[in-house]
Amino acid sequence: MDITNEKVKILNENIVETKKAADVKKAETQKLLDQVTVEEKEANIVKEKATETENRAKKILAEATIVKEEADESYAKAVPALEKAKSAVENLKVE
């Protein structure tokens, strides 16, 4: 019976040590989870700012595209007038 009691005592001590080790791992895991949660919130803020910047950039690009198209149209209209003016200048007779 003493051997059995001794084995039970050793097993109980092992259980206590294992529980202590598990509690340490649990605390470390919780600390990591807390850190990940904070970093996730920070990453979401950065992501939101990046999305806002991307949307502003898209808007600016759309506006720039419109300005370019308008400039291309104006240029296309101006070229024939410029060619006519050049031709007129070349055809001027100096007397």
Image: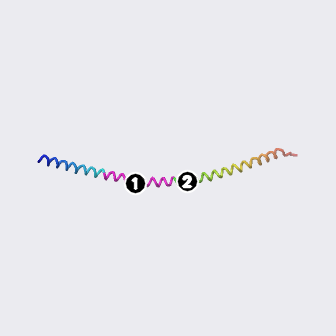
Say whether residue 77 is left or right of residue 39. Answer: right
Say whether residue 10 is left or right of residue 63. Answer: left
Question: Residue 1: x, y in percent?
Answer: 11, 48
Q: What kind of secondary structure does the magenta stretch mostly adopt?
A: helix
| Coloring basis for residues | rainbow
Say whether residue 53 is left or right of residue 80. Answer: left
Residue at image point 76% right, 47% down = 80
Question: Residue 87: x, y in percent?
Answer: 81, 45
Question: Residue 17: x, y in percent?
Answer: 23, 49
For disc 1, the neighbor class at 10 Å (few under 14, some 14 to 19, many from 20) is: few
- The answer to if 39 sits in the magenta stretch is yes
Q: Amino acid at mark 2?
A: Asn
Residue labelled with disc 2: 55
The residue range painted magenta reads 26-50
Residue at image point 19% right, 48% down = 11
Residue at image point 26% right, 49% down = 21
N-terminal-most mark, 2 or 1: 1
Question: Residue 95: x, y in percent?
Answer: 88, 46
For disc 2, the neighbor class at 10 Å (few under 14, some 14 to 19, many from 20) is: few
Say whether residue 23 is left or right of residue 62. Answer: left
Q: Amino acid at mark 1?
A: Thr
- The answer to if 36 sits in the magenta stretch is yes
Residue labelled with disc 1: 37
Q: Secondary structure at mark 1?
A: helix
Residue 9: which numbered mark, if any? none
